Image: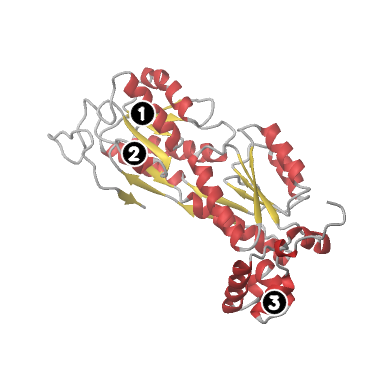
Amino acid sequence: MPGRKRDKSFSLPTISQVAAEAQVSAATVSRAFSHPELLNRKTVELVRSVAKRLGYVPNHAARALSTGRAGNIALIVPDITNPFFAALMRGGQAAARERGYATFIGDSDETPELEDMLLTKLSAQVEGFIIASSRLRGSRITELAHRRPCVLVNRDIPNLPRLLVDSGPSYSQAVEHLASLGHRSIAYIAGPSFSWSDRQRYGAVTKTASALGIKIVRVPTSRPSFEAGQACVDELLRTQASAALAFDDVMAQGIMAGLGARGLSVPHDLSIVGCDGILAPTLYPPLTSIETHCAQAGKQAVEILLAALEGGNLPSRRISLATGLVVRATTAPPPDGLPASAPGKSRRPGHIRTATTLE
């Protein structure tokens, strides 16, 4: 009602109140949230503990007006439902939250045009970007990086900071593992044709297979999804391959479901290897997969971006993150073959029970 006094009991605590309660300056309270690395750990813990007890929330809008910094970053991914990107986002968001930053999430739906729109529109609201598995042209990414600092994940563009999950060597290990079981024909279930990861993986697979005398058949798909994995099963069976290397765990899960719908089982009728290692232990049978440590990639990418935002320099670094093959229960000798290491003996489906990391 007009003229009615505002109930002060509902007013939010101020930075001055936090400072008085913690017996520090207001500037120290501000630094505890915006630049904690400038203070000792005990001071940061004290200030944040008092702030939490009083219900104080840093006013990023006010900080943006006074400093030109919004305290926001954005993480753009091609498919928010994919477990790899979900884990990457959680790792990145946790790292940003620890430093007092909010994270905007953008899903480009595997569409370069939508990715471009997200980067263009969000650039007015954020201080920098983490761009994962970008589907844009390299020249366009470089152009956008001149507007706002960017750190790339799984996209190798010179002169830009990037973290590359190096799964190629592990796909080579997967080919060697299947060859040791007696497989001579392997299908590669491809990811997006414009994906950096897909090129790395397929290149490693074909090179290793050629050295071992293994036949590789590439099976294209529409996008890395459960549905695409299901949809490719008929073409996979036409290749007469005895094993399949899937672009990721989600596609491998779709393939397993498609095989089951046709009365076929894994690994008795077909061995399969996935990638990411997130869904793998929860599937039945547990999936042989390549562990990619995606949450760590998200965390590290954010740390690089924030260090640049707070220090004013974004180094052009190329960081490679190692992966490893974890053998579970979806790989076994082919139906009419025997494991090379044990002539005269056969192996029943699901014989492998304990995960073994080959790194």
Whether residue 159 is visible:
no
Distance between the alpha carbons at the discs numbered 1 and 3: 59 Å
Please determine whether, in this image, residue 74 is positioned above or below residue 53: above
Judge the density around disc 1: few (<14), some (14-19), many (≥20) Cα neighbours within 10 Å: many
Q: Amino acid at mark 3?
A: Ala
Mark before the other along the chain sequence, 1 or 3 = 3
Secondary structure, mark 1, is helix
> Picture coordinates of residue 163 (x, y %)?
57, 52
Q: What residue is at 69 percent from the left and 76 percent from the top?
A: 19
Residue denoted by label 3: 19
Q: What residue is at 50 percent from the left and 43 percent from the top?
A: 84
Secondary structure, mark 3, is helix
Quadrant housing residue 170: top left
Residue denoted by label 2: 287
Task: State left or right for residue 262 relative to residue 169.
Answer: left
> Picture coordinates of residue 246 (x, y %)?
42, 33
Distance between the alpha carbons at the discs numbered 2 and 1: 10 Å
